[in-house]
Image (spheres, helix red, strand yellow):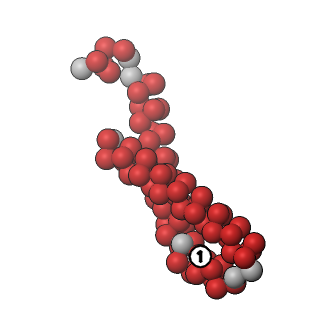
């Protein structure tokens, strides 16, 4: 489960950073009036962000099973 948690954290960080860069880049491109930047951001940043979001969602879903398993076990079984 530590691998899944690491994947979740890394993809979440990549997604959040990508989102900040994407939105800030779009805002700057709109202020400057440069449509090439908008096209560049859309072509090269949107797809990796969608992939990171999908992987993050799957990892988060798998991590939710870990919590359900821990809640269903008695206290003695968790300490072993």
| 77 up-or-down from 53: above or below | above
Label 1 Cα neighbours within 10 Å, binned few <14 / some 14-19 / many ≥20: some
Q: Give the percent coordinates (x, y) of residue 77.
A: 30, 19
Q: Give the percent coordinates (x, y) of residue 68.
A: 47, 32
User: Which residue is found at the position 49% from the left and 70% from the top?
Assistant: 48
Instruction: Say what secondary structure mark 1 lies in.
Output: helix
Instruction: Name, please, the residue furthest toward the front.
Output: 32
Nearer the observer, 53 or 74: 53
Q: Which residue is mark 1?
A: 41
User: Which residue is found at the position 71% from the left and 67% from the top?
Assistant: 27
| 68 up-or-down from 15: above or below | above
Quadrant location, the N terminus: top left
Q: Give the percent coordinates (x, y) of residue 6.
A: 36, 46
Instruction: Name, please, the residue furthest toward the bottom.
Output: 36
* Left/right of residue 34 with respect to residue 8 in the rendered view: right
Nearer the observer, 41 or 2: 41
Instruction: Name, please, the residue furthest toward the top.
Output: 76
| 76 up-or-down from 11: above or below | above
* Left/right of residue 53 with respect to residue 32 in the rendered view: left
User: Which residue is found at the position 48% from the left and 61% from the top?
Assistant: 52
Q: Give the percent coordinates (x, y) of residue 38.
A: 66, 79
Quadrant location, the C terminus: top left
Does residue 28 appear in the picture of this structure? yes
User: Which residue is found at the position 60% from the left and 58% from the top?
Assistant: 20
Quadrant location of residue 23?
bottom right
| 75 up-or-down from 10: above or below | above
How many tags in the picture? 1
Does residue 54 appear in the picture of this structure? no
Quadrant location of residue 18?
bottom right
């Amino acid at each position: 489960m530590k691998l899944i948690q690491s994947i979740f954290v890394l993809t979440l960080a990549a997604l959040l950073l990508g989102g900040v860069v994407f939105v800030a880049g779009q805002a700057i491109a709109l202020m400057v009036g440069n449509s090439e930047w908008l096209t560049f951001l859309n072509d090269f940043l949107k797809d990796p962000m969608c992939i990171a979001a999908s992987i993050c969602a799957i990892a988060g879903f798998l991590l939710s099973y870990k919590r359900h398993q821990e809640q269903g076990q008695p206290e003695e079984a968790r300490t072993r």
